[in-house]
C-alpha cells in the first residue's frame, strides 16, 4: 500500500495535478503489471499502448516505465480509456478498459454548473470533494467494478531502432537518416524541408 501512495505522489508530481485521468493511467498500469508479474520497465521489456491522448498517458508512463522517449509507449488517439500492457519475453498482454464513471443526478448537475462557470463557492467545494472521491474510487476500487480486464492477442511493435546520423546540408544539424528528404539535390532535415512544413 505504501508503494502505491508513493507511486501516486510520483505521478502527480510528474503530471502536475491530480485528476481522474491520471488515476486511470496509474491503476491500469498497476492492474496489468500485477497480472503479468512484472516490475517497472527498464529497457523495453514491456510495451504500453494507450488508446487516448489524455492525462492518463502520464499515469501509464510513471507506473509502467514505458515512456515516449524510450519508444515503448504507443499512443493511439482513439479517445478511449483503454490501456494495453505487454511483456515481450512471453508475448502476454493485459488490456484494461475503464467502465464509464457513474454519477448521481445531483453530481451531474454539479458538474454542469462547474463547467458553465456558474457554481457557488459551496458547489465548487463539493465538486473538489467529488473529484477526490472519483480519484480514490479509480485508485482503490475493486478491479471488476471499475474496469474490464482481458488478455488480448496483440502484435508487439518492433523495438526502437538505432539509425545512422546524417548532416543536413542546409542547417548543418545532425539528424537520423530515415527522416531525411531530398530538396534541390541536397539532403535536408524535416525542419528545413519546405514540402513538409506546408503539409
Ligand atoms: Zn490531468
Ligand atoms: Zn536542416
Image (tube, helix red, strand yellow):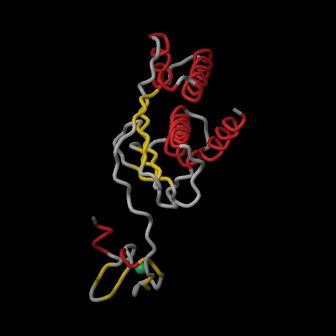
Give the number of callouts.
Answer: 0
At a point 51% along the width and 35% down the height, the residue shown is: 24
The x, y position of residue 156, in whole percent, is 38, 55
Q: Is residue 142 left or right of residue 188?
A: right
Q: What quarter of the picture does the N terminus occupy?
A: top right
Quadrant hosting residue 150: top left
Q: Is residue 66 left or right of residue 1?
A: left
Question: At 54% from the left edge and 28% from the top edge, which residue is drawn?
Answer: 138
Location of the C terminus by quadrant is: bottom left
**Depth check, front residue: 128 or 152:** 152
Rendering coords of residue 162 (x, y %): 46, 74
Expressed as whole percent of the image width and height from the top left, the position of residue 93 reads 42, 45
In the foreground, 120 or 163: 163
Q: Residue furthest front?
A: 90
Q: Is residue 37 above or below residue 20?
A: below
**Position in image of residue 71 (x %, y %):** 47, 60
Indicate the quadrant where residue 135 lies: top right
Residue lying at the far right in this picture: please name it: 2
Is residue 18 or residue 7 the one in the foreground? 7
Relative vertical location of residue 140 with respect to residue 87 in this rendering, above or below? above
Amino acid at each position: 500500500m505504501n508503494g502505491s501512495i508513493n507511486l501516486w505522489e510520483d505521478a502527480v508530481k510528474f503530471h502536475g495535478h491530480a485528476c481522474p485521468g491520471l488515476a486511470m493511467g496509474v491503476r491500469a498500469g498497476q492492474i496489468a503489471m500485477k497480472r503479468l508479474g512484472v516490475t517497472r520497465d527498464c529497457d523495453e521489456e514491456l510495451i504500453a499502448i494507450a488508446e487516448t491522448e489524455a492525462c492518463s498517458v502520464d499515469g501509464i508512463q510513471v507506473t509502467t516505465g514505458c515512456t515516449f522517449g524510450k519508444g515503448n509507449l504507443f499512443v493511439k488517439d482513439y479517445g478511449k480509456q483503454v490501456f494495453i500492457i505487454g511483456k515481450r519475453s512471453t508475448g502476454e498482454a493485459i488490456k484494461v478498459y475503464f467502465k464509464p464513471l457513474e454519477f448521481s443526478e445531483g453530481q451531474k448537475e454539479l458538474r454542469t454548473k462547474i463547467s458553465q462557470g456558474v457554481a457557488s463557492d459551496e458547489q465548487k467545494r463539493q465538486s473538489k470533494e467529488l473529484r477526490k472521491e472519483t480519484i480514490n474510487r479509480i485508485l482503490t476500487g475493486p478491479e471488476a467494478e471499475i474496469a474490464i480486464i482481458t488478455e488480448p492477442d496483440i502484435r508487439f511493435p518492433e523495438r526502437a531502432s538505432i539509425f545512422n546520423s546524417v548532416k543536413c546540408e542546409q542547417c548543418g544539424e545532425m539528424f537520423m537518416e530515415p527522416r531525411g528528404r531530398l530538396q534541390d539535390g541536397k539532403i535536408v532535415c524535416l525542419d528545413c524541408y519546405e514540402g513538409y512544413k506546408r503539409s
